[in-house]
Amino acid sequence: MESSAISITCQTDARDRPLTAIRVYRAAGHPCRGWLTADGWTVPVALGRGGILANKREGDGGTPRGTYHPLQLWWRADRHPRPRTYLPVRPIRPEDAWCEDPRDRRYNQPIRLVRDQPGDRLTREDHLYDFIVEIDHNSAPRIAGRGSAVFLHLARTNFSPTAGCVSMMKPAMLRLLRRMGPRTKIMIG
């Protein structure tokens, strides 16, 4: 009995694969605003109130200079359908928060808070954290005081500065998410 093999080759368009790299740089004459470029398109972004800093410290308001990778997407499932992305996806729950206390052993990690416990909750009344791309800034190893909760997230309509994150409008975020994967390099600076 003869065995026959069938080979099928499927050609994919570059726009169907994860991005290799994203570049974020500051706008000329405005250290708190910048541009994000990826695969031939450019969108405006807001940066930290301290601009892009090579020596990021907790509370300095700076966006850290360097090359990072996205770890996962956090999203408000109660407000939006699950976006298309190559990243791991996690819905934001009411108890989800981020530890920004350098004295805490859970510094720069997600934590869960009970109802009356204080902390930086990911469920915000405004829509800034409706989509959060967690990046690997200060994650391996985590060093106390070197900055926490640096994300890609949604911007205010006036692109006012962030506390150190990179923020953009929702259409830009959704377009970026469709092409972002765990191996995508995020080059800031």
Image (cartoon, helix red, strand yellow):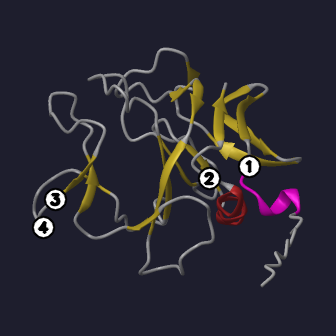
Q: Which residue is mark 2?
A: 181
Q: Which residue is mark 1?
A: 19
- Crowd around label 1: few <14 · some 14–19 · many ≥20 (10 Å): many
Element under label 3?
A: loop
| Discs 2/3, front | 2
| Discs 3/1, front | 1
Which residues lie in the magenta part?
13-19
Of the two numbered discs 2 and 1 on the same chain, state the one appearing first in sequence: 1
Of the two numbered discs 4 and 2 on the same chain, state the one appearing first in sequence: 4
Kind of residue at badge 4:
Arg
Q: Residue at x 79, y 79 (%)?
A: 3
Of the two numbered discs 3 and 1 on the same chain, state the one appearing first in sequence: 1
Q: Which residue is mark 4?
A: 115
Of the two numbered discs 2 and 3 on the same chain, state the one appearing first in sequence: 3
Of the two numbered discs 1 and 4 on the same chain, state the one appearing first in sequence: 1
| Discs 3/4, front | 3
Q: Say if the magenta span includes residue 16.
A: yes
